[in-house]
Amino acid sequence: MAISTLHTNDAPSAITRLLELGVALYLIKAALLGVMAQRLVRTLWPHCASKRPSDKDGWKMLTTRWKRCMAQPPAEMSFPAVCLECRETGYMGREEIYEVLPVTDAIKNWIPPNAEIGKLRLAAMKEGMKTQRFSGALKVAEGRTTIEEVVRVAPITNHE
């Protein structure tokens, strides 16, 4: 097993990056088992975070792709407030949001020599991949970060 890092925006982009780096298509299809992409979001400082009614429009924008499992926003969401401990930012520390792309046979069929990232991303989502924004939405629902923070580090793409 080999583990490596690549600088890409998301998991499907790693496949196109490997192609750009000159890795043979047959090697990618034969050897790649999965890709994980991660980003860090700032974590709300629990000592000064405040609860308020949910931002329904923000939640809808964040979760539009997953209407079935995230149709309703939480009743309340946590928002940053300020104190001296958090240096008046409302945040302290960071947590990861991530997506995991298992390279299944169906995904391998979507990897042509000039892979179009949008189609590959949609195929991955149909195979069950949850995006970084989905992971971030779960953290918003748990009160650990904000919608704005998730959108800041994992912007909305045309393919979600």
Image (tube, rainbow, N blue to C red):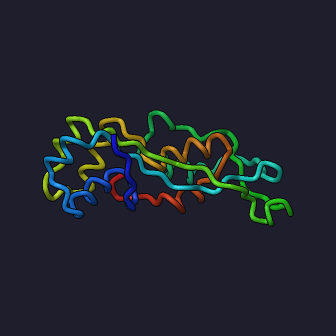
* Residue 131: % across, % down: 42, 46
Q: Nearer the viewer, residue 43 or 8?
A: 8
Q: Is residue 47 left or right of residue 61?
A: right
* Residue 104: % across, % down: 25, 35
* Residue 19: % across, % down: 21, 58
Q: Residue at x 31, y 56 (%)?
A: 13
Q: Residue at x 76, y 53 (%)?
A: 45
Is residue 81 depicted above or below 77 in this figure? below
Q: Is residue 121 left or right of residue 42?
A: left
User: Which corner quadrant of the image does residue 150 belong to?
Assistant: bottom right
Q: Nearer the viewer, residue 30 or 62?
A: 30
Q: Residue at x 21, y 57 (%)?
A: 116
From the image, which quarter does the N terminus lie in?
Answer: top left
Number of dots carrying numbers: 0
Q: Nearer the viewer, residue 140 or 24?
A: 24
Q: Residue at x 46, y 49 (%)?
A: 132
Q: Nearer the viewer, residue 120 or 64?
A: 120
The residue most toward the front is 1
